Image (spheres, rainbow, N blue to C red):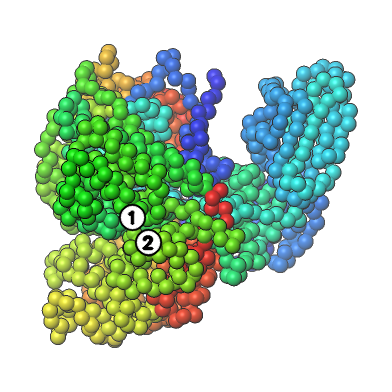
Amino acid sequence: MKKKLNLTRRSVLRGAGTIAVALPWLEIMAPTKAFSQEYNVAKRFLTIYTPGGTVRDKWASSGSEFNFNFGPILQPLNSLKSKILIPHGLDMKSAIGEQHQGGIIALLTGTPQNSSRNDYSGGPSIDQVIANRIGGDTKLKSLQIAIRWATGKSHGLLHPINALNFEDNGRFNPIPPRLDPQQIWNDLFGQLDNTDPELLALLNRRKSVLDFVGKRYQTLSQQLGMADRSRLEQHLTKIREIEKALQSEVVSGGACVKPTRVDTSDYNPKSGLNSSDNGSVKDNRTDAAIPKVGKLMMDMIVMAMACDITRVASLQWTDTEAKHTFPWLNLSDHHHYYQHDGGFRPNECQKIYTWYAEQHAYMLQRMAEVDMGGQSLLDESVVFIGSELSDPPTHDKKNMPFLLAGNGGGLRTGRMLNFNGRSHNDLLSAINNLFGANSNAFGDRNFTSGAITNLT
Amino acid sequence: MRTKLFEAISKMPTLGILAVGSARNPHVLPIRSGSCALAAANLPALDRFLRRLLVPLFFWVISLAGCGGAGEETSSSSSSSSSSSSSSSSSSGTPVADLEKWNFILGINVGGSSFRDTKGLTFEADQYFTGGTAQVVTGQIAGTQQQALFQSERWGNLNYEIPVGSGRYKVKLKFVEMFWDANDSRVIDVNVEGQMLAQNLDIHAKAGKLSAYEIESPEISVNDGSLSIKVTASKDNGTLSGIEIYADRDNAMSFSDSTVTSGEGIYTASCSQCHGPSGDGNGIFPSLIKSQCKTCGSASALISKISMTMPVGGDRCTGDCARSVAGFILYAFNDDAPGTADCRVKSAPVRRLTRFEYNNTILHLLGDDTRPGNDLPSEEIGNGFGNDANSMSVSSFLAEQYSKVSEGIAERVVNNQSQWQNLHSCVQSVTTSNQQSCADQIIDRLLPRAFRRAVTSTEAQAYKDLQRGLIQSGSNFKKSISGVIEAILQAPDFLYRVEKGVMVDGRLKPTDYEMASRLSYFFWGSMPDDELLQAAANGQLSTPAQVKAQAERMLAHERSRNMIRYFFDAYLPISSLNHLERDPATYPHFNAQIGSLMREETQTFLERLIFDGPGDWASALTAPYTFMNETLAKFYGISGVYGDAFQEVPMDTTKRLGVLTHAGIMAGTTHSGHTNPVVRGAYVMKKLLCVNIPLPTGDILEQIKPPDPSSGLTGRDRYSQHSKDPVCRTCHEKMDPVGLVFENFDPVGLYRTHENNVQIDASGELPGTGIRVDNAVELVQAIADDPRTHQCFAYNWANFAYGKTIGASESCVKDQVTTSFTEKGYDIRTLLVDLTQTDAFLHLPSDHRQ
């Protein structure tokens, strides 16, 4: 099989934050399988993050590979068991750094927290690598959404305790997620079937302006030294992405249906800006709206995929601080308090994690119901659900509570596997391979021992 | 924990363990196999053990080739095999092999792609050639371990021109006969730098088919920047499979500014974690300071060492990477660094407007005071001020928000009467017949102010054409102007402070307009005012004196107060005091308003000190007064202060002295309901004294849990583990002794003598000075007397002013600024003006345009 290196000058420059020569290993350079019908390549990738691990003995499943039973926490997913693969026994060995930050940073990157990258990641997150490979011509190359995000110490801002996704561009910049459900609805579906002349005029003007501005970046960058040129070209790349998103026509029909718009005026997406380090500032109104907003966000993600607006998405149910309350579960302290701030409270934690399992069930069920033309959205996708640690009181990161779902790329679900302490980097490589990579390693090579091969 | 770690170490299979330490302080860890250098280590076993523990986990997974600090060469190091080396003793009395005479600096896999052989030599993919055809075989080649090298060839008439600096070299050339089965089928001539190396060479006769053959050149001199290798044939075709180039360790090498800057970037990202930002190895890893590092005295040896063994955990840095890093190390850590008289700026990355600057610019350009930049994502922290040009990047989200925010601004401008009229007076009488010319006039007026420079008619015409196009596709007049504003606000000419520079007297410097922006964004965080733009237009911003005069004017202008507030909001831990929350049951008198007032106290104090008071940083640290209003004074428990205005209030100097004892600083360094001496100590040492204290890693990190609030009666008790445990102590003794002195200040910054009914012991010391103190008043005086404090202050202002983190390659800039600051009595206003008089402010790097 011929190895095809598809590096344009743009991607080489992308690797050059300064004028780096002898580039660090860029995942984009990994050999890929040729794209043809012969290869079963997954079509969509969804990551779901929940904070604070789980109550391990209540989460674990029992039984054998094909004949297993969920523990109490995962019971809500019972009807979807055939669509789920449980990879017990994976350790996040590359999660080195602050005990929460290192976890969320390594979860999708397989690299330790990196002080020369402003305490963020030393590598790209797997969703970005996959997006660069399969997300070429969609309106959005990838979509990051978060609910009740940036609580506690991050005070509403992007911070190593809440950064999950990192660009695949040699600088691995953290990507801030979208927070406002109304704005997300407008951005994703506002143009769908919209014949409002005001909106169309605005879009036309925006296209003209962006085209004009893009040309100026093009011209000016050529007049500058190499380092500055690469900076302006990076900006230009982003402008071109927006232009492409504006140009791509998304029409409803078939699986693509505009999701119902819901009133979320009781939800303040920027609530984190008022947060205190220890979660003592409570926002009960916003917290009470979390189930409603969560459902809307999940609906929008499902439809964004069904409408091919994007093929790669990630959803964060808050951040590693998790300093919000759960009024609908009658829990008036915040999650981190039950994790260990007030001493580990396994009963309260179990309630929370079970509720998250219900949300996962909703998401997977919706994906299973969307008919993409002979197969469901879930059939052609890979869903990866994880957390920044496994055991809240000790911050242990062994035997992580991961879940895989969907049959994209030939992922064989309805199974329970045990990897006996293998590095989770190997799982990330295997996921990468489901999407057409042909690689033995992902992330920091010190923690890889080869891609897991029995997912398919 | 200790035993577990030791067991883990003993279980490490077969690998040597990093031999650490510089020639100055050789500690060597026990090794299990291989022959890493052994230096006598007359140290207590405990200290050796501590060093071992501080090595991050992943460094344990290294190959033997990676072993050996720069200060200790070994005979099994992966240098060239053709060497003439002699042993000599190091200062510790242990025999240390001398530097190899010939150092491998470059390999080329002729006809093939890059690979690394078993001895650590990295071969670049085939390059620098003209002529020939590549060919690859897959079978085993006899007589070599460099299979990938010999399995590829380039055949034909070959000409290699390999760029190297002037000096003496040796090359090894590798050949293999892939095609012919008999002798006398292929006969070649090999020529290196004009000298015949092999004539009528028949590879098959020498080695047979598919069998490795190599020849080594004698010493050759290269003076023209290019090492030439030519292969021709008298029978059939020439062939070549591999090239190894070795440089004389004494070759003098020079490195361009861009090479050094590039090397700095790589060094910071990949090397500084171990070798330290200033190359001293953080006291644990090999030092790169020339006087302590033999390899670092020879460019060739350094390039060789790097390309073959570094970085320890990752893909090797070879070829240009090794050259750049070597150049940086030689320049930055070289004992003969140029003095400040020769100080030249090395890099000036283009600076994008920060949100602070964006908001101010929008206000001054268009009259919009809604601070729309706050909808943009926050900047990366970088140098601590959010304006570090090297660490800024553009995310998709940022680009989208620029678009949305500019549309919001444009909408407000065209619909707000005064903003609309400020565009140009013609808008008041616009009709369908004159609207075109009005649009042109708006653009002609707006563009040069938005782009902060003169604008050509061609440039302006492009925007006019855009406006016309929008009209033609159905926009009304106001919407077409909106479109123009949106284009302007997203243009690189607006968002970035592009500097093309101009050559004057053989040096590149900012143009007058570019200097205007440098001045205005430094002193005001905003666009130049009309006076500055006029001075630029008149060519009156060229000389240092002219720049200084403007600097003084702008510092005296009230707009500078905003900038100074911004700096201290970032430098001192006061920016989130507005949102500070404390448990109302424990602190009933504290609320968010008090938090805001605390911040106001510190900002007012600094502003008044700088502009009306003694004006120096030492006085700020030791002033016996502060500023409060009535509400805040009541909180402090001080009587006699009336009204909402902030007024000067004397401090009780038995308890407080200077800015560090403001309640806001104390509350801002407390993140929960209990004080934390580590946070406070680390803040002072890292931010105020610029002492680098690495974070714990690996196994240590996993064991760390914050102390249970009920585990001790006082803060000193709760954190006692840090001084009891020798592993913790190595780092914590550098910061806890400071934080513990501040224990008299509770989580809301109020003074207390007891905690949980136990008297607080506020004794401590200032690490690095040996000065012991009994309370905060004594401590802040020691801090104010410490030269590190003032160097750090000046360094931070320089980073802020220049939008970078000044690195070792520009250490002369840092020295210039800190020396001047010290000589002038730590005066802050003088510092700010002096920052405009350095080479970094007045010039551009020589290779800025390349």
Q: Residue at x 53, y 28 (%)?
A: A5
Q: What percent of the width, then of the height, locates residue B836?
A: 45, 68
Placement of the N terminus of chain B among the 4 image quadrants = bottom left
Which picture quadrant has residue B171?
top right
Quick check: B845 above or below B123? below
Q: Residue at x 75, y 50 (%)?
A: B166
Q: Are marks 2 and 1 on the same chain?
A: yes
Residue B533, disc: 2
Q: Out of A65 and B189, give the one closest to the viewer.
A: B189
Q: Residue at x 73, y 35 (%)?
A: B160
Q: Is residue B783 left or right of residue A13?
A: left
Which residue reaches farthest front?
B433
| Residue at the disc numbered 1 | B449
- Are circles 2 and 1 on residues that touch, CB within 8 Å? yes
Chain letter of the residue carrying label 1: B
Q: What percent of the width, then of the height, locates residue A157?
A: 28, 51
Q: Out of A236 and A124, give the one closest to the viewer.
A: A236
Q: For the residue marked with disc 1, what is the amino acid?
A: Arg
Q: Secondary structure at mark 1?
A: helix
Q: Secondary structure at mark 2?
A: helix
Q: Residue at x 37, y 23 (%)?
A: A42
| Mark 1 surroundings within 10 Å by alpha-carbon count, few (fewer than 14), some (14 through 19), many (20 or more) | some
Q: Is residue B371 left or right of residue B687?
A: left
Which picture quadrant has residue A343?
bottom left
Q: What percent of the width, then of the height, locates residue B707?
A: 31, 62
Q: Out of A52 and B295, give the one closest to the viewer.
A: B295
Q: What percent of the width, then of the height, locates residue B180?
A: 80, 18
Quick check: B191 above or below B675? above
